[in-house]
Image (cartoon, helix red, strand yellow):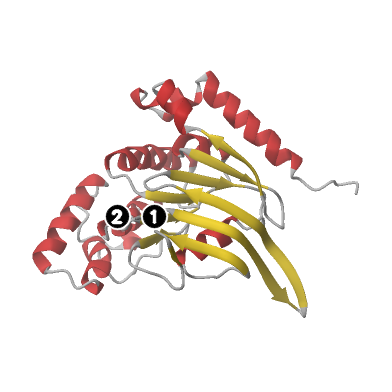
Amino acid sequence: MSEIAFDGVTRVFARDGRDFPALERIDLTIREKEFVAIVGPSGCGKTTCLRMVAGLEFPSSGTVKVGGSAVTAPGPERAVVFQQFGLFPWKSVWQNIDFGLKCKGLPAAERGQRIRRFIEMMSLQGYESAYPHQLSGGMQQRVAIARAYALDPAVLLMDEPFGALDAQTRTVMQEELVRIARDNPRTVLFITHAVEEAVYLADRVVVMTRRPGRICAIIDVGTVRRNESWDRLERIEEVMDQASFVHMRTQIWRMLREQQPDEHG
């Protein structure tokens, strides 16, 4: 059971004796093994949504549930991948991936089997003994994703995971994530500012208004992807050339443009 449910979620932050609403009446269900991306203007509460699912923040009103149970704290069934890779600089690639598995108390043989599997999946063979400072940004993020998947979470929470990468590396990582999501489906909540990334990766794209964040639209990408067999296309640029992709990207961009503040008012 890995369904994520936001039910009437409002989040208000207090600052200097005043209340600042970040989110207002969010109702959203992310189905089991569905990949959902959230896009919206800066400050609209995208990351706050993710942090509430992770158990790092809590609603001011309403409920956030995972698998039918209210989220009250972080849990091993939910893994988080942040924009900043969050690797232990004093641990090797192998040791970074192994850390969470050790905390779960898994036997050494099972840990080794899992680590080897995800090192191979993320094309990190030969780098098992390397330290983060010896890796490129893209390779460090591969380690972070391998570490998250190795924990076998039911829910994967990704907050701008490719935001710190250069454009070419980001493209490669997007293609890798599509492959991994197809081969190892999880319930994924993905936060991004990049509309093209959201449409390329997600089954559905949630578009939010400016603060206080509300849901203004949910775009069904998965149906179009299946109907037009995007999965047969190997390269991201081939998908982005599809007329249906261009249409959805333009539709979302127009929605976001409408959320920009009026410079004259």
Q: Earlier in the sequence, mark 2 or mark 1?
A: 2
Mark 2 highlights which residue?
149
Residue lying furthest right: 264
Image quadrant holding the N terminus, namely: bottom left
Picture coordinates of residue 123, whole percent (x, y) = 24, 45
Residues under labels 2 and 1: Cα distance? 8 Å
Mark 1 highlights which residue?
156
Residue lying furthest bottom: 17
Picture coordinates of residue 97, whole percent (x, y) = 26, 62
Q: Are the residues tagged 2 and 1 within 8 Å (C-beta)?
A: yes
Seen in the picture, residue 120 relative to 199 is either above or below; the reply is: below
Label 2 crowd bin: few (<14), some (14–19), many (20+), radius 10 Å: many
Seen in the picture, residue 186 relative to 95 is either above or below; the reply is: above
Residue at image point 45% right, 38% down: 201
Secondary structure found at label 2: helix
Residue at image point 25% right, 61% down: 93
Seen in the picture, residue 134 relative to 162 is either above or below; the reply is: below
